[in-house]
């Protein structure tokens, strides 16, 4: 543990971080990590319930990309000596494909707004971390576009599960 704290202090000094800026960044990243892990679970659960196989494939690919985002964030948290947070379970609910996609669009829209704020908070002290968050934000834009396309092609009257 002492070795971890020493490395954490060294990284903060190397990157020119104030202790307060460091703790704020780690807390932001911990929250972002939870969100990304929950996205992985949600998209994976929903993919299994999608009526159309092509939608399943897209959601599983999006889930894999979200898992990659969580991995990037986990690396940074551990580099700064932080602990990964426990991720609350995502309760599976029963909806049809259209309802899942509608909920996904709203969740991704809210997430995009949060990431924009996080980028602004982290940018002054951690431009490299802000850049990583920007990549996640760009992937999120693409994910929203893909989800929107699936949503527009789905049938709101489709009964799933039946």
Image (cartoon, rainbow, N blue to C red):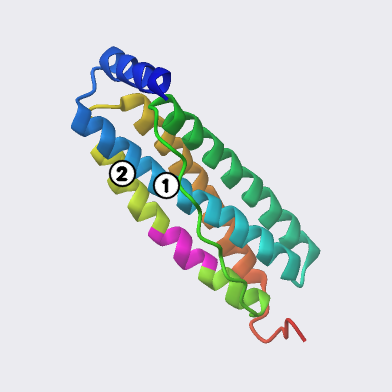
Q: Which residue is mark 2?
A: 118
- Please report the residue visible at 68 percent of the width from the left and 49 percent of the height from the top: 61
**As drawn, 16 above or below 73:** above
Magenta-colored segment: predominant secondary structure: helix
Residue 123 visible within the image: no
Front residue (pair 127, 32) = 32
Residue 108 visible within the image: yes
Q: Which of the 4 quarters of the picture holds residue 50?
A: bottom right
Residue 58 appears left or right of 23: right
Quarter placement of the C terminus:
bottom right
Task: State the SS at label 1.
Answer: helix
Q: Are marks 1 and 2 in contact (CB under 8 Å)?
A: yes
Look at discs 1 and 2 and give the one toward the viewer.
1
- What is the total number of numbered labels drawn onto the structure image? 2
**As drawn, 65 above or below 56:** above
Q: Which residue is mark 1?
A: 32
**As drawn, 1 above or below 153:** above
Residue 119: x and y, percent?
31, 39
Q: Please give the range of residues in magenta.
A: 104-110
Q: Pick whichever of labels 1 and 2 is earlier in the sequence.
A: 1
Residue 48: x and y, percent?
75, 65
Label 2, residues with CA under 10 Å away: few <14, some 14-19, many ≥20:
some
Q: Which of the 4 quarters of the picture holds residue 79?
A: top left
Quarter placement of the N terminus:
top left
Task: State the SS at label 2.
Answer: helix
Front residue (pair 43, 140) = 43
């Amino acid at each position: 543990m002492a070795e971890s704290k020493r490395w954490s202090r060294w990284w903060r000094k190397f990157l020119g971080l104030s202790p307060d800026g460091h703790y704020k960044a780690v807390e932001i990243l911990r929250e972002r990590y939870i969100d990304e892990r929950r996205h992985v679970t949600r998209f994976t659960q929903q993919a299994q319930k999608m009526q159309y196989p092509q939608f399943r494939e897209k959601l599983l690919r999006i889930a894999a990309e979200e898992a990659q985002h969580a991995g990037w964030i986990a690396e940074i948290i551990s580099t700064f000596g932080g602990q990964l947070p426990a991720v609350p379970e995502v309760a599976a609910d029963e909806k049809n494909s259209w309802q899942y996609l509608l909920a996904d669009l709203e969740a991704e829209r809210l997430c995009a707004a949060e990431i924009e704020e996080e980028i602004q908070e982290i940018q002054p002290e951690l431009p490299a971390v802000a850049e990583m968050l920007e990549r996640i934000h760009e992937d999120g834009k693409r994910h929203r576009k893909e989800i929107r396309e699936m949503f527009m092609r789905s049938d709101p009257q489709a009964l799933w599960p039946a």
